[in-house]
Amino acid sequence: MRHPKQTTAGSLTGFPVLGAPLAGYQGGALSRGALSQAFEELCVTTGAEKFCLADLSRSHAEEAPKVLASNWSFDAIEIIGTASIETLFQSPFATALAQQPRAFQTGNPGRSPRVVDETSALRLLEFGHAEIFALKLRAGVRRGICLFSASTTDRIRPSKLSPAHLMSNYLMSLYRDGAVSIAESPLSERERECLFWVSEGKTTDEVALIINVSANTVNKYIVSSIQKLSASNRSMAIATAIRNGII
């Protein structure tokens, strides 16, 4: 029996317009690695070559935006800088959900000079960012921006950006610091199943009936889960697994 919250490979339900296979990310927290993989796939579907996802939420004004996932070079991120990311978020080039995306072209002299200065724009162009689409994201109290870029203009498909925008917002909402992706989970399929059903209030006998094994086997899976998660008891193992998106 498959874990009821487990993600599975295949086209993402609800986003068929993206027109390419995406790993299913329904439910559970996303680790940094899983988040990066998802955005790599979004690049393929939109025609973008690079992405940079930044969390603009902060506990105090002096705190810099945090890059959650990116395949931009370090130099490019340094060029645009945290101040420019914030400026770009507030500029006319930043697209809100359900709005028509508008490209920011670093080689276009008619662009708004308030976004980045001339030198920074030319250096971004040098590093392969001729066209950048800035997508505003908001999930609860989390505020962010995703930059999709390409080395040439008209490479990115705006028709694919709208559904990708929705997907980006959803993916950011799933990201958790320190989350463990299913592929990286220290628990086996059976161990995750047992721990999940125990977290739902099922007894050992009930779990054994659900997954069609003996009660003794269920106890072995639970003990193994506790050890692998460095927990001291079932409750702590369940809390650790939920916090890290394992169940």
Image (tube, rainbow, N blue to C red):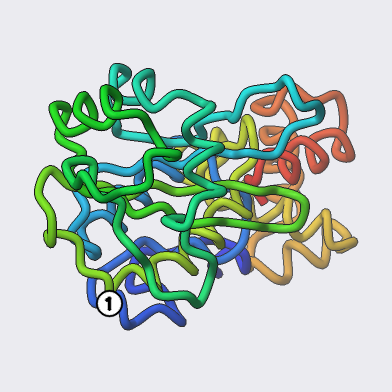
SS class of the residue under badge 1? helix
Q: Amino acid at mark 1?
A: Ser
> Please, is residue 150 above or below residue 165 in the view?
above
Q: How many marks?
A: 1
Q: Position of residue 49 (x, y in %)?
A: 19, 46
Instruction: Name which residue lies at 17% across and 27% down.
Output: 127
Viewer-proximal residue among 96 and 139: 96
Q: Position of residue 173 (x, y in %)?
A: 63, 54
Residue assigned mark 1: 159
Instruction: Name which residue lies at 57% across and 29% down.
Output: 66
Q: Position of residue 90 (x, y in %)?
A: 56, 48
Is 65 left or right of 161, judged from the image as shown? Answer: right
Quadrant in which the N terminus is drawn? bottom right
Is 2 left or right of 210, judged from the image as shown? Answer: left
> Please, is residue 158 above or below residue 233 in the view?
below
Instruction: Name which residue lies at 76% across and 27% down.
Output: 61
Instruction: Name which residue lies at 21% across and 24% down.
Output: 123
Label 1: few (<14), some or many (≥20) within 10 Å? few
Q: Position of residue 111 (x, y in %)?
A: 30, 48
Viewer-proximal residue among 123 and 198: 123
